[in-house]
Amino acid sequence: MPVRGCAKRSHCDYNRPLAGDGLGLAEHRPCRYAEESMHKLLATLIAATVFLPHPAVHAQAYPSKPIRFVISFGPGSASDALARIAGQDLSQSLGQPIVVVPKPGADGAISAMEVKRAAADGYTFLFGTNSALAVAPNMRKELAYDVMADFTPVTYLGDNTFFIVVHPSVPAKSISELVAHAKANPKALSYAAGNTYALVATALFAARNGIELRAVPYKSEPDAMADLLSGRVQILNGTATNVAAHVKDGKLRALATTFHERSPLMPDVPSFPEAGQAKFPIGPWFALVGPAGLPRSIVARMNKEMVAVLAKPSVKELMLRQGFIARSSTPEALAAYMKEQLDVWKAALKAAGVEPQ
């Protein structure tokens, strides 16, 4: 008997007994035309499912690709070493590589602009220092970024230790002897400045002691080392990353650390207060920031992971070998600190006699 309602009644065999079942039961299947229509409908639905955007495709778990840490100084600098130390452990916890990208020059402004222009997607950060985030805004009359408006604070990273070292041709064996030698030989001594802290701190040291030292700027501290080791420049306020080995080998002489206490890297070298010098109002610091508009979820994730990395004893030890004391903060605390440091460095530049250019 044909199926009711089928347009092709003569071809329907809905109630044909099942072949070989021996029971005479109805097959209960639609006619071939109904089947064909159903197949076409299913094919259309499947195709639509394939081409419709799926939320999971666009909401990939963060991070899903390598993350860039842009630094303000070149290969071999303290920034380079510290970013790689932090990046190695961070890549393990995030499951993605951390790529260190040097963008030296313009007192850190070039690296800052690289991050400012980046997409706020969590894949580009400034592993920055006071140079880009506090000094350049006060030293450069024309700067294409606003520290407080163009970046998203993530976490404070820590403080670096600097040492005042001299070439062996300089007869001074202490800070007081260096001051006396400089006074006896006006304008005879020059100092290398591979970063803004070295430039401003040494200028402030000279101003406080009434001596004249000639500044020789370099893009990055490693660039200054050849001239220092050859004696073409005689003084450097530098990082342990670049001076510690040369001091140990006798190629340079360390007179003091500008930190407020002695460094375990050179325990025999006095701190600035021990050397009879007032504590500096400024210090070399590092912070992690992203572009403006970075999503809160990414800020929270990066802060959590970086704080955990900086708390690891193994990371602390590796950083300490570079003269770096690892510390961390909340994004809010870093924002307040960055704002404060803009004023601190403005006053320090004025006291050191460094004019904006």
Image (tube, helix red, strand yellow):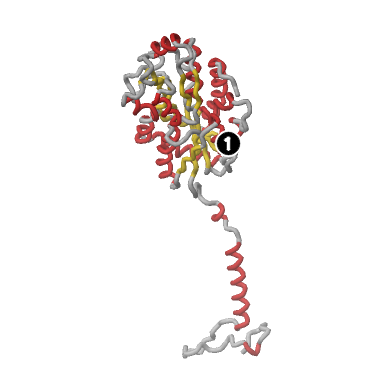
Name the quadrant of the C terminus. Answer: top right
Q: Dot 1 surroundings within 10 Å: few (below 14), some, or many (20 or more)?
A: some
Tell which of 329 and 324 is nearer to you: 324
200 is higher (above) or lower (below) than 292: above
Residue 36 image offset from top left, x and y in percent: 61, 79
> In terms of image quadrants, where is residue 85?
top left
Residue 217 image offset from top left, x and y in percent: 50, 25
Q: Name the amino acid, label 1.
A: Met
| Residue 154 in sight from this viewpoint | no
Name the quadrant of the N terminus. Answer: bottom right
Q: Secondary structure at mark 1?
A: helix
Tell which of 25 and 110 is nearer to you: 110
Seen in the image, is 116 located left or right of residue 191? Answer: right
Total numbered circles: 1
| Residue 14 in sight from this viewpoint | yes
46 is higher (above) or lower (below) than 35: above
214 is higher (above) or lower (below) than 100: above
> In terms of image quadrants, where is residue 276?
top left
Seen in the image, is 3 located left or right of residue 297? Answer: right
Residue 181 image offset from top left, x and y in percent: 41, 11
Q: Which residue is mark 1?
A: 113
Seen in the image, is 123 located left or right of residue 318? Answer: right
Residue at figure coordinates x 36%, y 14% from the top left: 171
Residue 318 image offset from top left, x and y in percent: 36, 34
